[in-house]
Amino acid sequence: MNLFKSAGCGLLMAFSADSALAQSNVTPPTPVMSASSQVGGSLYVTYVAAWIDVVSKAIPGLTITQEPGGSSQNIILVSTGETDFGITASSQAYLGYNGLAWAEEQYRDFVGLHPAFPTYMTIVTLADSGIESVEDLAGKELAVGVPGGGSDTIARELTDYLDIDPARYVNASWEDTGGLLRDGLADAILYIAGHPAGFLQELEVNRELHFLQLSDEQISGFLDAYPYYAPVSLSADTYGGLSSDLQTIGQMNFMIGTSDLPDDFVVAILDAVYANTDRLAQAHPNFSETRLENVRGIPTPIHPAASAYYENLGVEMRLAPPPAQ
């Protein structure tokens, strides 16, 4: 199976006029709540607000209130039935489902519904640096953001997995990192977050950038070793230094729901979401990534009705392997 198989545009033709009829025939539960994040905390609040607007307008009689939460907290809120829906990240979902790290127990009463938006890992150097592949990072100065941050963490996991020893991990704020690369105080940057990143955009105004590409085998193996990450694809038009879409590693933020959501309600929600991705993108450009091909970034079980929905469309799903004993 090709890990990077894309759900083509033709699949969207499956959303026909019957979808609107199906939505109108659904009797939504009441009351309905969805958890996002603390007010002003993250894109979660913005996404869930846009999501509520889309699905409530598509399904007559549906009213959803947005409640505060957080990536790991939403796993708990949905699993215990305190809210019907929530948004979370692939790492938090995997750890919560398996009772690892932040989770003091296994949370199994939540299911994935659809992707929201991903973060992407990029490894960037200057085009004239002589660094052509990730293996060339051996003995080099690799800038990874603040100590203990997401970029710092995955940089150490990735280089350990690939058996690459940088000369040093350079910790600095992202505001300073572009200047470190420009001035030769770092040889490359590893950054995982949303894109485009302002410091990279500023850097490529005057310098040509080179983005290192991991092989399919490297990505697949790393995801087996660290299942809480996800396969993602960064669009070629994000940076001038990209000549094609960058297949990489990231985290998928995705919508979850309680395990007992009615099948017809779940299908109506999926129809509404995928038929209105343009409206989601109006709230934030990153929300255009609510796409069928990003279903593969959900590492935990998907609602049975959603799973059948994706199977009918030929969409690839990925249940991450259990943690090693």
Image (spheres, helix red, strand yellow):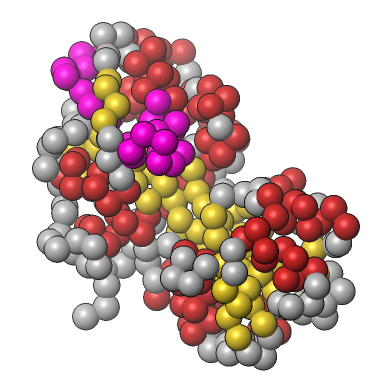
Q: Whole-percent x and y of residue 51?
A: 40, 26
Q: Whole-percent x and y of residue 130?
A: 82, 80
- Left or right: 152 as drawn, with respect to 318: right
Stretch in magenta: 26-49
Residue 36 occupies which quadrant of the picture? top left
283 lies above or below 239: above
Give whichever of 220, 234 is nearer the camera: 234
Residue at point 87%, 74% (across, down) = 128
- Inspect this view and state whether residue 243 appears: no
- Left or right: 129 as drawn, with respect to 226: right
Give whichever of 5, 209 is nearer the camera: 209
241 lies above or below 19: below
Residue 13 occupies which quadrant of the picture? top right
Residue at point 75%, 51% (across, down) = 201
- Left or right: 6 as drawn, with respect to 56: right
Residue at point 50%, 49% (across, down) = 118
Q: Which quarter of the rendered picture does the C terminus lie within?
A: bottom left
Q: Whole-percent x and y of residue 203?
A: 78, 58
